[in-house]
Amino acid sequence: MAIRLCEANISFLLILKLANSQKQTILTIINIDKMKVKPITRLEINHTLINLMEYVTSLRISVLIITFLIVTSLNFLSAQKISRDLNVDLLINHAGYMPGASKTVVTKGQVSGNFEVINILTMKVVHTGTFKPATGDFGDYSTGDFSAVNQEGRYYIKYDTLRSFPFTISSDSYRPAMDLIVKYFSLQRCGASSTGYLSPCHVDDGIRMDNGKHQDVSGGWHDASDLRKWVGATIYGMIGLSRTYELDTRPVNNRHKTLEELIWGNQYFLKMQEPQGYVMNYVGGDVKKHSDSNRWTDNTVGTEGGELKFVKPTAGKSTADMLIFGSNDDRVIHTDPLDLTGQFNFITAEAIMTRITKTTDKAYSQKCLEAAKKCYEWCLAKTYNQETGIIGASMQAALEMFKTTGEEKYKSFAISQAAQLKKLQNTQKESEISGFFKTSLSNDEPYKNISEGCLEFISLCDLAKMFPDNKDISSWKEIISGYANNYLNVISMRNSFGIVPFGLFVNQDPGGNRKAGQYWYRYFMQPELSWWVGINANLASAGVGLLKASQVLNDPKLKAIAQKQLDWIVGSNPFNSSTVAGIGYNHPKHFPGSTFIPNTPVIPGAVLNGLGGTHEDQPDIGTGSWQISEYWTPMVSFTIWLMSELTAAS
């Protein structure tokens, strides 16, 4: 190594060489002006600086400062780090933030230094914050808050040699993602559409399972990274899109595209309604065994009749058994009624469609209203167990019917359901954890559902917002506060990312050995189960509920927790991975489907099932499995709904 030293009018060149094998330093100093050479050899490393200063003093140089670092374990002097790479290890929301949002940066390990938020266009530091280290359920992480940065712009965060991906702060931060999700639905269209990624498809849906007759149930959307049309799952597309439509009040907005998609999707659901009022279960789903109808068809309506049977494909590369009637490849309609949660979700969708099409298409609006009323009456005539999930969906349906019609009976029903929900809440205030709901009066297991969301929580908040002067408002707020503060918030504080749990467990440890009071809890479903998926719908729906609760209770803390649920989905997680296709970076490996060709392509705007967990309940990004990487309508719908709510709230 050569270092040029200057003192007054004398210049020196210091040449330093390491003899690693002998642990010696050979030092030569040359007076450049006089070209006088003075070698110094066999200096012990520990005495190098002392001997150097003695030698320099002998040359009567009054001031000389030399700083160098000797790494004795490697026996070399370290130079400035030179790399082809960047350490993008500061974790943020890849989609950005609203100006007034809570904003958090996370990094792995115990870090306590200062980080800088830098405006990319000016390259100026606009904020300096401090990391706070903590050990949580996912290990050691350090978090920093930069909520004070509210000026719209493009930024990145820097700490030492680490940095974040660039991100936007803007009142329109989530608009690109929301517009892309609307576009995703158009690409997932089933039937003879102008936008479906392999249109036309399944125009011959389908053959009724109960009588073998053809009934037109074409249209709608493929539900996931497959070709199935489960009504119970795809109906969430109607809910997510319709919420987005009503919340998008910008002068220049994407409502026309959203409405186009809603009308396309709704044709399928209206076709699936039977004269009695209920909605049938699905077409293209698994009738007799896995994936028996998850396939392409010839788009030609076949001859009715024949035996329902399994056959082997006689052409193509896919070999899985096909379930068909006779010799036709038309897919089978599972004609049994959809479960009650799905029926009430259908009512919600049709009630909202009635409102938003009332001024543009009165006949269509009336058709939607009649469909909602018929299904509502059918549901109320059924005798069923008052389970938490059904209560939540029924409250939502009744509230939307009241908004649409103003009829008092719907309001009364929603209020009565809130009273039933109160009976199911755990209110042990002396316990470490409380406020959650039991599954039912006959089942004490804490309620949890990965795909149907926190509709009971969301609906109760909507009830309180709609009727703030009701005599029961204090009771409703108490239920809301118990669930938000004594359950969701308690667990969210146990991990550095602030995400809420999947659920609580009573009888035994489900894996992970996480306990709160007398209950075990997990953030992820157990991977040992025969069916499990990632957590995006659970997080996004809880985020919607928390945001609404923050408004009901006037509690900004809950809004901050709601933000963190979206942050995790779009990048602020241990893998720095966005689970929204086309938004952000480091997406999980694509899952294309497995029993049909062509497979499902990468579709921008798709929301994946989300990160899963190990047996120990640690985050897992997987290797392209359907449980983590498959697209699924509930995940897509709750995510766009949360984005819409956060945008509107700002």
Image: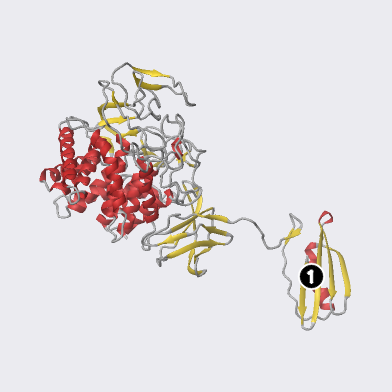
Look at the picture and state if 370 lies above or below 3.
Answer: above
Q: Residue furthest left?
A: 408
Relative to 372, 506 lies left or right: right
Q: Position of residue 174 (x, y in %)?
A: 38, 55
Q: Residues within 10 Å of mark 1 (few under 14, many from 20)?
A: few
Of residues 309 and 421, the one drawn nearer to the viewer in this rendering = 309
The type of colouring in the image is secondary structure
Q: Residue furthest top?
A: 307
Relative to 294, 359 lies left or right: left
What is the three-letter code of the residue carrying label 1?
Ile
Q: Position of residue 188 (x, y in %)?
A: 37, 40
Q: Residue furthest bottom?
A: 9
Relative to 376, 184 lies left or right: right
Q: Position of residue 354 (x, y in %)?
A: 19, 46
Q: Quadrant of residue 341?
A: top left
Q: Position of residue 59 (x, y in %)?
A: 84, 79
Point out the image quarter for the N terminus. Answer: bottom right
Look at the picture and state if 462 lies above or below 6.
Answer: above
Is there any visible trace of residue 275 in the rendered image? yes
Please, what secondary structure does the residue beneath circle 1 have?
A: helix
Point out the image quarter for the C terminus. Answer: bottom left
Of residues 487 and 349, the one drawn nearer to the viewer in this rendering = 349
**Residue carrying label 1:** 50
Is there any visible trace of residue 427 in the rendered image? no
Of residues 336 and 556, the one drawn nearer to the viewer in this rendering = 336
Relative to 34, 551 lies left or right: left
Of residues 557 and 48, the one drawn nearer to the viewer in this rendering = 557
Q: Identify the residue at image location x=27%, y=31%.
A: 216
